[in-house]
Amino acid sequence: MSDPTQEPMTSPGEISQWPMLKIVYRTDPAKIAELLPPGIENSASPNVNLTIYNLPVNEEPEYGILMTVDATYDGIPGEWSLGYGIDQEAPIFICQSANGQPKFPCETAYYRLGDKVAARSSHQGYTFVEFEGTLGDEDPLPAEGIERHEWWVKVSRQVGFGKGYDFPPHVVHIYGKYGPGHRVALNGTLTLRESPWDPIATRLPMLEQLSAHLWWPEYLSRDISLAGPLDPEAFWPHIDTISGSRWPGHLGGPIQG
């Protein structure tokens, strides 16, 4: 009998066949609200979603971590992206300038050895996320698959650091459709560690770990489009961030004090 937790590999070592490590935990909805610009609203579920991956980007392997919170825009529930920490330099700046994708440099270690799955992400010498677990049972998604909405913001601050914009803030809508693929539950523990550069432990403290999975998705479609403007004046307190993320910052670094 085949092992239901083992996705068949047609080409061993092929990184496009690596699973995503998907972790969801519950946090304080007030903490989420502090991070959302006016126009983006809390969803019914106060969840934080972490995706740790190794995928081919620009025909090279990219280790990364995606951090989002459940959020709603224009009546559509989705996820507000706080940051894509990646280990490739080339896509960071072009993705920021073209689409507003909040990418920043980060080191991620992620592996599976037998039944063990482990991952950690570090930035500026601080490890801010760690996970360690073991394989559980197959946990399939619905046969029709899933749709996913993600929200970024494209904005350009005024040249010379004045209070104004060369391009005022606009929401970017990322719509993805996936087949069920193959999904396996994990028995494991997520640990958030304090970091001034990636303050997930303090800004989005974990109240309850809800789930952890390995997921081999079936990619069907992905569309990136400009969705609509945000109030420029109301957005201004959110203009300064840490590196290329959407964590609140000061002159591109952590807020001091």
Image: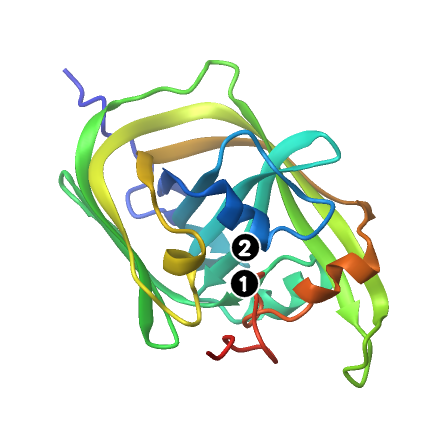
Q: Quadrant of residue 209?
A: top left
Whether residues under marks 1 and 2 lie with C-beta atoms below 8 angstroms apart, the answer is yes
Which residue is located at x 29 percent, y 28 percent? 184
Distance Cα–Cα, label 1 vs label 2: 6 Å
Q: Secondary structure at mark 1?
A: loop
Q: Is residue 216 above or below residue 111?
A: above
Q: Quadrant of the N terminus?
A: top left
Q: Amino acid at mark 2?
A: Leu
* Residue 7 in view (yes/no): no
Q: Judge the density around disc 2: few (<14), some (14-19), many (≥20) Cα neighbours within 10 Å.
A: many
Q: Amino acid at mark 1?
A: Trp
- Residue 148 percent coordinates (x, y): 58, 32
Camera-nearest residue between 224 and 39: 39
Q: Secondary structure at mark 2?
A: strand
Which residue is located at x 79 percent, y 53 percent? 170
Residue carrying label 1: 247
Q: Quadrant of residue 65?
A: bottom left
Residue 82 image label: 2
